[in-house]
Amino acid sequence: METSVERSTISRRNFINLAVGAGAASALAACGSSGPGTASGGGAGAASYWYLTGAPGETIRKNAVDRFNKANPDTKITGTAFQNDAYKTKIKTAIGAGQAPTIIWGWGGGGLKSYVEAGQVEDLTDWFGQNAAIKDKLFPSSFGPATIDGKIYAMPAETVAPIVLFYNKEVFEKNGAQPPQSWGDIMNLVTLFNSKGVAPFSLGGQSRWTNMMWMEFLFDRIGGPELFQGVFEGKANAWSAPGAKEALVELRKLIDANGFVRGFSSITADSNADQALLYRGRAAMMLHGTWTYGSMAADGGNFVKDGKLGWMNFPAVEGGKGDPSNTVGNPGQYYSISSKATAEQKETAKKFFKDTVLGPEEVKEWVDSGAVPVVNGTEATLGQSKDAEFLNFVYGIASKAKTFGQSWDQALSPTAAEALLDNIAKFFQKSIGPDEFITNMNGTIGK
């Protein structure tokens, strides 16, 4: 059975695939749906729940519904699974028409914000206040993308996938290098590895979102998490906030110093070519999501098995405001409740959240799949995995982060996210500089 740590970067694409083509519309007819308010199982509280297909998540989600229905035969939940792009079309249309399922599976961030602004999802702030034990069991950092204007509109669920700095231990040892503890160390390593004929960093730059990860960390480490928070909140000229230009200037220095493998703008992440450069020793380091661990283990021969892969959180930037425990990436997935559901259906959804979601059975299923659920106190369960060392590292990063910043292209609206990715690509190709990037992005605020 394929585990989440064995999946390639297609896992990441589930989070940032912004374009929906005609094929998605035709896929809807094949998916079928019980529709909102038509869940089977009898009783006024019978509810509906839409979520994504794909192993292992689909099976784990279905199992959770089955457990709930067995314990609550009079108020069952009917689940319907959709492929990623088809789901994005279907759920947007249903919510816009006031016909959303009772339980809405989502990514939080910009999409959730649009639902909140349209009054389509339930405010769960008071419910979490009344059920402190539920909130306390979840990573505090997972609530960021669920919180809009200080109120909670979704339950953090499922798993985390932070971005981390991977490095090839063998390449480091061969060249007498140590893992970087600061931004200054990174720049010194760039000089060292270039002098040895090794690319300092692998990068699948053609995919654009891989470039974004560098910008996310530098903005956080230099300006602090409030820098991007201003962008998320739609504050005028938020991209001009203190620290933004400094972060862009530092990133430009890295690009100018040949910090990335030659030809990075033609390398795709979806092909895993960037990972191959690392495990084959052609690049010393790679900034990437934790989901790449499994594909490197599967495709890199004995690279991971023999302990040649190293990992660490992104180091601090000298003089920066950001806490070095902060991370970025995917803080979790998010379950909302439709504001158009009946009172009885809302109660069924809340009971599902309280009694079943991320219960012991589900937590074990996620861990067995090679993932880290957004639940405190799972170290012992993670320790039983063959990937225990890495999974406990991921757990530590996610659970201890003072701020877990959501990937920018998911935090923003689709329109602003596409403009962001386009401008990031231009910045890395040096066709625009820091000032032009800031001006262009300020023009997208509110779109």
Image (cartoon, helix red, strand yellow):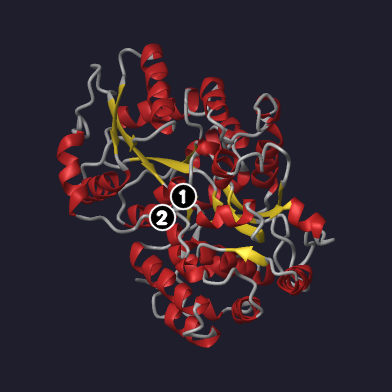
> Does residue 256 show up?
yes
189 over 127 or under it: above or below? below
Which mark is on residue 16?
A: 2
Residue pictured at 62% horizontal, 44% vertical = 140
Identify residue type, mark 2.
Ile
- Where residue 195 sits, quadrant-wise, is bottom right
Alpha carbon separation for disc pair 2 and 1? 7 Å
- Label 1 sits on what residue type? Arg
> Circle 2: is it few (<14), some (14-19), or many (20+) Cα within 10 Å?
some
Name the quarter where the C terminus is drawn.
bottom left
Q: Which mark is residue 358?
A: none
Instruction: Give yes or no for contact between labels 2 and 1 (Cβ–Cβ under 8 Å).
Output: yes
For the residue labelled by badge 1, is the local secondary structure a helix, a strand or a loop? helix
Secondary structure state at the residue bearing disc 2 = helix
Residue 301 position within the rendered picture, expressed as x and y whole percent measured from the top left:
61, 40
Picture residue at 78% right of the left edge, 66% below the top: 182
78 left or right, relative to 129: left
Q: x, y percentage for residue 424?
A: 48, 73
| Residue 312 location (% of width, % of height) | 72, 52
Left or right of residue 86: residue 174: right
Query: Which residue is nearer to you in this view: 272 or 209?
Result: 272
Q: How many numbered marks does the figure carry?
A: 2
User: Between residues 441 and 388, which one lies in front from this camera angle?
Assistant: 388
Crowd tier of the residue under label 1, counting other residues whose Cα lies within 10 Å: few below 14, some 14–19, many 20 or above: many
Q: Residue furthest right?
A: 176
**What residue would you read off at disc 1?**
12
When asked about the image quadrant of residue 139, the answer is top right
Residue 426 position within the rendered picture, expressed as x and y whole percent measured from the top left: 45, 78
- In the image, 214 versus 201, the foreground residue is 201
| Rendered view: 50 above or below 87 | above
Foreground of the two, 351 or 71: 71
